[in-house]
Image (cartoon, rainbow, N blue to C red):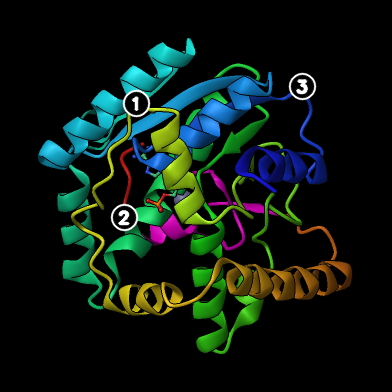
Amino acid sequence: MNIEQKARQTLAKIKLSKKDKILVALSGGKDSSVVAYLLKKFGYNIKGFHIDLGMGGYSERCLDSVKQLCKQLDIKLHLYDIKDEMGSSMCYIRAGIQHEKKGLKNCAICGVIKKWIMNREARNIQGISKIATGHNLDDEAQTFLMNVLKGSPKLSANSGAITQNTKDKKFIMRIKPLFYVAENDIREYSKKMKLPVVYEHCPCALDSYRIQIRQFMNTLTTKQKENIMKNFDRLSERIQRLKAIEKLNYCEVCGEPSRNKICRMCQLVSIKR
Ligand code: AMP
Ligand code: ZN
């Protein structure tokens, strides 16, 4: 199956509708750009969303790519400037958090903050019913493997091509159209389609454990990565059947949906409201 067929199959599996209004979280990288390109090609109703993380030249190049892509695809782009909205760049926010809470990894902190922003902003854009991200087969197999090695495969239970088990009016479902597509195929496709994409890695992705796992993953074939995710799917289905639909709380600090009394974002930073 080629990348387009795999993406179509995934969208059918998660029952994405042409009535859905989808906000594509665009990083400027190949994966999310390909997601936007394919959803547009398949005739879905999409808009773009980009968080300018304020990380110097790298962020500037990402912003340029995102703007070009949205122009090319003729879709509206919503921009969130972290310096304007939160007062400093991701680097400073993260350094502040790490000063207080040593040992927290760059990507983990950035991931929590980005998800919090995406959900809140998506909710504020009229009619948005889904957020689409560029997560691919390699990302997902890597995360699942890391959870297995940590001894907590259940941590992956709510992951999947669509967020599982959470229904709440303040929570926008997230979808991953490239969940079953290998990173190499996405890179090749983005080049073939000549998409405006930044191919460099984020300069702050320095989590040595993740890098170690990625290096190991690079020794695997696509078939082996697919097999890891087949196991994930089986495990996930079983866990889903055992669990009831989760009722979310609202964070006591920021009011955003959360599994805990205080959301992960507010556990990390105190936010000006
Ligand atoms: P990452 O956590 O950097 O691997 O990114 C995972 C996904 O989150 C990407 O495929 C994008 O869909 C989204 N994303 C990452 N960075 C940004 C950003 N700066 N603005 C909007 N979406 C982003
Ligand atoms: Zn909160």
| Residue with the mark numbered 1 | 66
What residue is at 84 percent from the left and 74 percent from the top?
238
Label 2 environment density (alpha carbons within 10 Å; few <14, some 14–19, many ≥20)? some
User: Looking at the image, is mark 2 or mark 1 nearer the viewer?
Assistant: 1
Q: Up-down: is 164 above or below 58?
A: below
The C terminus lies in which quarter of the figure? top left
The reply to whether the C-beta atoms of the residues labelled 3 and 2 are less than 8 Å apart is no
Q: Which residues are magenta?
A: 248-268
Residue 85 place in picture, x, y as percent: 28, 31
Which of these two is toward me, 58 or 2?
2
Few, some or many residues within 10 Å of mark 3 (<14, 14–19, 20+): few
Q: Amino acid at mark 2?
A: Val
- Is 129 placed left or right of 115 in the picture? right
State the CA–CA distance, disc 3 to disc 2: 37 Å
Tell me if the residue at label 1 has its CB under 8 Å from ligand 1: yes
The residue carrying pointer 1 sits among few (fewer than 14), some (14 to 19) or many (20 or more) residues within 10 Å by Cα, namely many
Q: Residue 97: where, in percent of width, then height?
A: 23, 62
State yes or no: residue 82 in magenta: no
189 lies above or below 112: above
The residue at the point 21 percent across, 58 percent down is 204
**Residue type at the position of mark 3:** Lys
Q: What x and y, as percent, mark residue 195?
A: 39, 28
Query: In the rendered structure, does residue 267 fall within the stretch colored magenta?
Result: yes
Residue at mark 1 to residue at mark 3: CA–CA distance: 23 Å
Choose the circle earlier in sequence order: 3 or 2.
3
Q: Which residue is mark 3?
A: 18
State the SS at label 3.
loop
